[in-house]
Amino acid sequence: MKLNYYPDTDSLYIELSEEPSTESQEVTDGIVLDFGEQGAVVGIDIDHASKKVQLQRLVVAGIPGAVEQLG
């Protein structure tokens, strides 16, 4: 899973799987779910993220794998 924030567009993309998206559906204003070939959610795109989610702090708990910080 990856979280990518793009400050130039104020959007946050949460990549849940490396599977490519085959369909997208806006579920509410500015929040789009991406679906893979089997219908599972593979990503979440949040427009105007700074107004919808708390970007100042990220808490990670109970993750069984490695946590990496890039850039």
Image: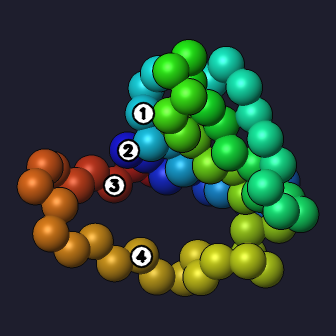
**Inter-mark Cα distance, 2 to 4:** 14 Å
In the depicted view, which residue is nearer to us: 35 or 1?
35
Mark 1 is surrounded, within 10 Å at the Cα level, by few (under 14), some (14 to 19) or many (20 or more) other residues, namely some
First reached walking from the N terminus: tag 4 or tag 3? 4
Image location (x, y in percent) of residue 56: 55, 82
Which mark lies nearer to you, 3 or 1? 1
Residue at point 33%, 54% (across, down): 69
- For the residues labelled 2 and 3, the Cα–Cα distance comes to 12 Å
Which residue bears the numbered disc 2? 1
Could you tell me which secondary element the residue under label 2 belongs to? loop
Q: Residues within 10 Å of mark 3 (few under 14, many from 20)?
A: few
Q: Is residue 20 visible?
A: no
Q: Is residue 50 left or right of residue 16?
A: right
How far across and down, in percent of the image, does residue 62 sit?
15, 69
| Residue found at x 79% / y 55% | 27
Q: Residue furthest front?
A: 39
**Quadrant position of the N terminus in the picture:** top left
Tag 3 residue: 69
Asked whether the beta carbons under mark 2 and mark 1 sit within 8 Å of each other, the answer is yes
Image height of 7 relative to 52, above or below: above
Q: Quadrant of residue 22?
A: top right
Say few, some or many: other residues with alpha carbon within 10 Å of mark 2 (under 14 / 14 to 19 / 20 or more).
Answer: few
Query: What residue type is disc 1 on?
Result: Ser
Which numbered disc, 2 or 4, marks the residue that appears first in the sequence? 2
Percent x, y of residue 48: 82, 66
Say which element carries label 3: loop
Amino acid marked by disc 2: Met
Label 1: which residue?
17
